[in-house]
Image (spheres, rainbow, N blue to C red):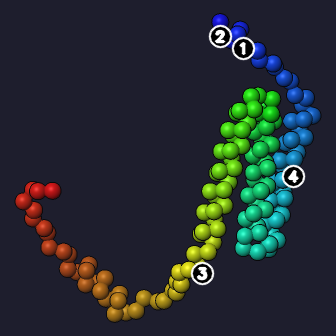
Amino acid sequence: MLADTHDHKHHVLPLSLYIGIGGALFVLTGVTVGVSYIDLGGTGNLIVAMAVATFKATLVALFFMHLLYDSKLYALAFSIGLFMLTAFVVLTMFDTMRRDGIYEEKATPIENETAGFYEKLKAEPPAEHHDSGHY
């Protein structure tokens, strides 16, 4: 059988390690919530939140998914994917957080003359267009 040819070592982690990692994840969630109440500037909060989220995901992958004890190639592939996802999310957030500095949007009330235009459209439906069947 194929399973007999591979030299796979089983590892058993103590329950205290799982409880410790779970406690660390709980504390890090509290850190994320706590930092959200502190103003660290526009990008400061984002950087802290993404760093904590990345660290939490790494803990889950290493211990709960057992990547620490499996082939290092799997851990490397997961780490690269996690890093790229984090980089793309952070860059996207930087872009969306700066939109108000680029595009000036001003809300203005609808004027009666403009609103009348829509009333005319409702009263006069557009004429039906008869096509010869060509697309």
Q: Label 1: state its secondary structure.
A: loop
Q: Are marks 2 and 4 in contact (CB under 8 Å)?
A: no
What is the three-letter code of the residue carrying label 4?
A: Val
Point out residue 12 in the picture as x, y percentages from the top left corner.
86, 24
Q: Which residue is mark 3?
A: 101
Question: Who is closer to the viewer here, 135 or 114?
Answer: 135
Q: Please tell me whether mark 2 or mark 4 is closer to you in this view.
A: 2
Relative placement, left or right, of 8 versus 126 is right
For mark 4, does the 10 Å Cα neighbourhood hold few (<14), some (14 to 19), or many (20 or more) residues? few
Residue furthest to the right in view is 16
Point out residue 87 in the picture as x, y percentages from the top left corner.
66, 56
Residue furthest to the top in view is 1
Q: Which residue is mark 2?
A: 2
Q: Which residue is mark 4?
A: 27
Q: CA distance from mark 3 to mark 2?
A: 61 Å
What is the three-letter code of the residue carrying label 3?
A: Gly
Q: Which residue is mark 1?
A: 6
Q: Label 2: state its secondary structure.
A: helix
Q: CA distance from mark 2 to mark 4?
A: 43 Å
What is the three-letter code of the residue carrying label 2?
A: Leu
Instruction: Give the answer, above or below, for where 122 lies relative to 3.
Output: below
What is the three-letter code of the residue carrying label 1?
A: His
